[in-house]
Amino acid sequence: MDSKQHRHLKQAIAIRFFDGQTSRERQGRMYPSDDSGMVWVDLEGDSDALSFRLKDGLIRAAIGQTPPMIEFAHDVCIELLQMDLPDWLTPTDWTESRLAWLKRMWLGRIWRWESSPRWILVSVVVTIIFAVLVLQYGIPLIAKQTAYALPEHTLDDLGVSTLATLDHDTLKHSELPIARRIEIREEYKHWISANPEREIIFRQGGELGPNAFALPDGRIVVTDELVNLVANDYELLAVLAHETGHIERRHALRQSITNDSLKALIIAVTGNTTSLLNETPAQLVGLTYSREFEREADDYAYELMVQKELPLHYFSDILLRLETVGGGENDGNDSLKNGLKNYISTHPPTSERIARFEGHS
Ligand SMILES: [Zn+2]
């Protein structure tokens, strides 16, 4: 050891040294040299000191609990055993590439982020926003992809059990003449869908009133009250076009997958399963859809009516008619408890739907 080295020994700091060849770490000390931008490294067990040019390395400031380090080519690395950089290591006078400078600024900034409460708050907020976006858009998107990939008959059992539940609790046999039912089925086939799987089922609606809804298996229940309410069959077809939109866009399956993903997520995050017990029958059987699904079904109806040259006002006409008769009918506690409601209350505001529908043209 020469005298030059010796003068700076009192500035030595403890380090760990990695030679980039083996994972073995070696203890040692590092101290500045007289030559600007050079450092000496003494390793335990070695008689000769190593020297490094600082500008060949990249100084990384402490990040969280990770101490500062200097990285050199070929994975050679000097890790400081203290969190602060010594004064003589603060990069001031040595030339450096702009890139290295930018990197260090950036790392210094991360370090500041990690240590500042304000930035911690910001990162918490960003995380929450991200989680909300996943819930809002990510899961529905996955549900959509999955629903279209699954066979159309996936929810057939749910359709059968849903109708059985409704038949037991709410619906009654239709009193419509058979000829009238056949007529409506023929019109549906002609104007809306010739798919033999699409079946119209007639029932008395009871507390569901004038109503139509798609079952998870793709059948559509139409109540006698709705058939008797419409001024003409085009109004009925407009409602059926909307319900067919729910079927074609696989809303029951998407809703079911979304609900299950949400359940899985809630359980994963909270470990709590009791929140799942509050679902109403209406949610379980898919009588209520999200606004997005209602818009999709309205868009489907719109496109179909334009394609078949059905005048669009029939859609607005029946919605307004449903609104005049539908309000206030189902205020009983029973129907609220069961979540079974009239057509208007299971759909977005009529004025909004009509405005959107007419806004297309
Ligand atoms: Zn709907």
Image (cartoon, helix red, strand yellow):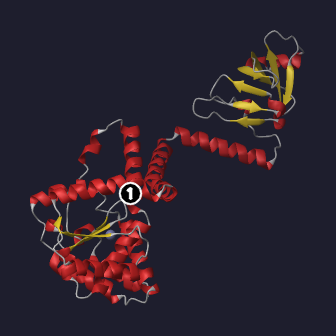
Question: Can residue 258 be seen here?
Answer: no
In this rendering, the answer to whether 183 lies above or below 245 is: below
Q: Which of 260 and 253 is in front in this view?
A: 253
As drawn, is 292 to the left or to the right of 38?
left
Q: Which of 273 and 325 is in front in this view?
A: 325
Question: Most extreme residue toward the top, as rendered?
Answer: 45
Q: Residue 129: where, in percent of width, then height?
A: 45, 53
Q: Residue 257: where, in percent of width, then height?
A: 41, 52
**Quarter location, residue 109:** top right
As drawn, is 303 to the left or to the right of 286?
right
Q: What residue sits 48% from the left and 51% below the top?
A: 130
Name the element at disc 1.
helix
- Looking at the rendered image, the quarter that the N terminus falls into is top right
**Quarter location, residue 313:** bottom left
Question: Most extreme residue toward the left, as rendered?
Answer: 332
In this rendering, the answer to whether 1 lies above or below 348 is: above
**Quarter location, residue 360:** bottom left
Q: Residue 132: where, in percent of width, then height?
A: 43, 53
Question: Can residue 99 be seen here?
Answer: yes
- Looking at the rendered image, the quarter that the C terminus falls into is bottom left
Q: What residue sits 33% from the left and 81% below the top?
A: 237
Identify which amino acid the numbered label 1 is placed on. Gln
Q: Residue 238: where, in percent of width, then height?
A: 33, 81
Q: Name the residue under label 1.
A: 255
